[in-house]
Image (spheres, grey):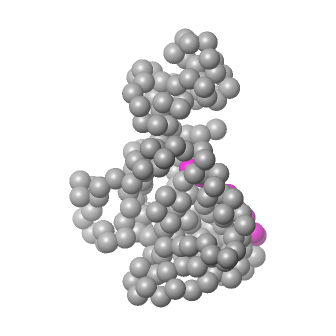
Amino acid sequence: MAKIGRNQSCPCGSGKKYKHCCLPLLQAGQPVAPEMVQPTSFSLRAEVEKLQAAAEKKEKIFFESGVFILFADEHGDGWLLEVVESDAIQVARAGDPIDIDLVENTETIEVNWSHTYELRDRRLFLTAYTDSRCFELENAPCQQIRAGVRRIQQRYTPEVLSMIHVDTENVDTENVDTENVDTENIGPADD
């Protein structure tokens, strides 16, 4: 099935634009006609690789993808943030990519997060899961991050955001440290 544009007529035949008809139902996880469900082509690994490529060139970059915020600074340090649970992991250091524990398929994404983050007084603080050490990330684009968090929280309903994380007890976690692993449900792509 071809991807449905947000401003196209809804395929259900209502005569409304897709964004005002079945798309919000899909995003809220409510049942719709089977022909309305679009396969997602989202790949967090591809987004991380895009960030790592910019970090390798020591280019500043900032972008959002789903419930994720990705950024790199002019020193080649890159981070991946998750908005729902305020998790974080470094994906590049001084221009060198860092191999992260990320497993994804068409329905879920599993990331072994290394930190939580918090924005305070226009500063970004990270706390490590391993030793609870807290430090400030000095070159973080805090204003952009705060605005990105707000956009993501406005883009998705609270019900959709609450469905992002699923119980990892039913996920095959062999050889994975499940203490800091979150499984993300992948929903329909947002144009």
Q: Within the image, what quadrant is residue 17 found in?
A: top right
What residue lies at 71% left-to-right and 70% top-to-bottom?
A: 141
Total marks placed: 0
Query: 110 or 10, which is in the foreground?
Result: 10
Residue 89 relative to residue 62: left or right:
left
The verdict on residue 178 being magenta is no
What residue lies at 52% left-to-right and 43% top-to-bottom?
A: 157
The verdict on residue 65 being magenta is yes
As drawn, 85 above or below 89: above
What residue lies at 23% left-to-right and 58% top-to-bottom?
A: 169
Query: 90 or 21, which is in the foreground?
Result: 21
Q: Decide if residue 59 is in sight here.
A: yes
Q: Decide if residue 105 is in sight here.
A: no
Q: Estimate the x, y position of residue 43 in percent, counting from the top left.
A: 52, 51
Q: Estimate the x, y position of residue 162 in percent, counting from the top left.
A: 42, 50
Query: 174 or 62, which is in the foreground?
Result: 62
As drawn, 134 above or below 92: below
Q: Estimate the x, y position of residue 19 in percent, counting from the top left.
A: 61, 28
Q: Estimate the x, y position of residue 176 in percent, counting from the top left.
A: 30, 68
- In the picture, the quarter occupied by the C terminus is top right
Dominant secondary structure (helix, strand or loop) of the stretch shown in magenta: strand
Q: Residue furthest front?
A: 121
Q: Which segment is the magenta one?
A: 59-66
Q: Within the image, what quadrant is residue 35 found in?
A: top left
As drawn, 53 above or below 16: below
What residue lies at 54% left-to-right and 44% top-to-bottom?
A: 156
